[in-house]
Each structure stands twice: as C-alpha cells, then as structure tokens.
Image (tube, helix red, strand yellow):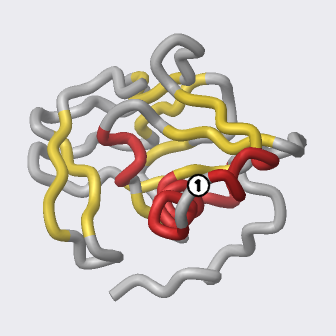
C-alpha cells in the first residue's frame, strides 16, 4: 500500500511508471504491505484463468524473496514502480523508504533485487 501521493504516467524506463505527486523527503516511508488491501495470489490457481489474466498477474505481481507458492499484487499504483539499478527507494526492509529526496513529478523507482529472488542488477536496461 502506497503511503505517499502518486500518479501513473509514461516512463522512460518501461511503459508506465509511478511518479511522485508531491515532494518526498529522504527517509520517508513510501510503501508497506497491507494484508487487507494487497492481494496474495496462490500460483496454483493461475491455470484457472484465461491467458490475459495470467499475463496481467505475471506482469504486475512479484514473488517475495524467500517465499514459494504465491505472488503479491499491490492494491494501488505501487504495481507501476519500475526497476532501476540506481533506485531512489530501498525495498529491503518491511517498509520501502526514500533513499534521497524525490521531487514532485520524479519517477519513483526500486531495485527488484531487493525483494525478488534471482533478480540480477542490469537484468532490465533503462532507456
């Protein structure tokens, strides 16, 4: 669940991205998992859905580090946060925080390696 005001717009990194709707100070909490709002999707049910739904789930969910058998879907615009090898957030803890001041209109990025097993830096190239 996002803890800051955001909007979704075209990204120079990949398709759509998550952008700050107001300035965010270094150290500010950006996102945290909320078991009521964020969806946990068991992977064994994916075959029940048509290909378009399965593609959506694969694109907008992640398998948290150290887990198996489920994927997490952010309930809000958080699913549009793109990877950067030089992110402006830290996702390695319970709460995602800003690693530096983020300007209004700046894309909010994270390192997928912080929370996805097997993700290697440089796996996605930025535009």
The image quadrant where one finds the N terminus is top left
Q: Where does residue 39 sit, x and y in percent of width and height?
A: 55, 29
Can you give x and y, in whole percent of width and height, for residue 47 in the image?
71, 58
User: Residue 27's x, y, as percent?
Assistant: 43, 27
Asked if residue 38 lies left or right of residue 75, the reply is right
Question: Which quadrant holds residue 99?
Answer: top left
- Image quadrant containing the C terminus: bottom left
Which residue is drawn at the image coordinates 81% and 57% (left, top)? 117
47 and 6: which one is in front?
47
Which residue occupies the foreground of this view, 113 or 79?
79
- In this image, 95 relative to 1: left or right? right
Q: How many labels sit on residues?
A: 1
Quadrant in the picture for residue 123: bottom right
Decide if residue 65 is on the left or right side of residue 124: right
Secondary structure found at label 1: loop
Is there any visible trace of residue 84 in the rendered image? no
Residue 74, relative to residue 58: is it above or below?
above
Horizontal side of residue 15 vs 68, given as left or right: left
Residue 94, above or below 6: above
Comparing 79 with 46, the one in front is 46
Question: Residue 102 appears in which quarter of the rendering?
Answer: top left
Q: Which residue is mark 1?
A: 49
Q: Residues within 10 Å of mark 1 (few under 14, many from 20)?
A: few
Residue 32 in view: yes
Q: Residue furthest top?
A: 36
Question: Which residue corresponds to the image point at 66% horizontal and 37% vertical from the top-left?
Answer: 41
| Residue ID at (54%, 81%) | 124
Name the residue at 73% across, 45% down: 45
């Amino acid at each position: 669940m996002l803890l800051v005001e955001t909007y979704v717009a075209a990204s120079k990194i990949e398709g759509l991205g998550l952008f700050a709707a107001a300035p965010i100070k270094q150290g500010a909490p950006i996102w945290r998992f909320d078991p009521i709002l964020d969806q946990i999707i068991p992977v064994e049910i994916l075959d029940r859905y048509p290909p378009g739904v399965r593609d959506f789930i694969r694109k907008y969910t992640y398998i948290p580090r150290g887990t198996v058998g489920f994927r997490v879907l952010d309930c809000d615009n958080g699913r549009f946060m793109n990877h950067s090898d030089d992110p402006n957030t830290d996702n390695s803890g319970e709460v995602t925080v800003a690693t530096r001041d983020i300007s209004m209109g700046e894309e909010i990025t994270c390192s997928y390696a912080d929370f996805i097993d097997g993700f290697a830096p440089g796996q996605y190239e930025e535009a």
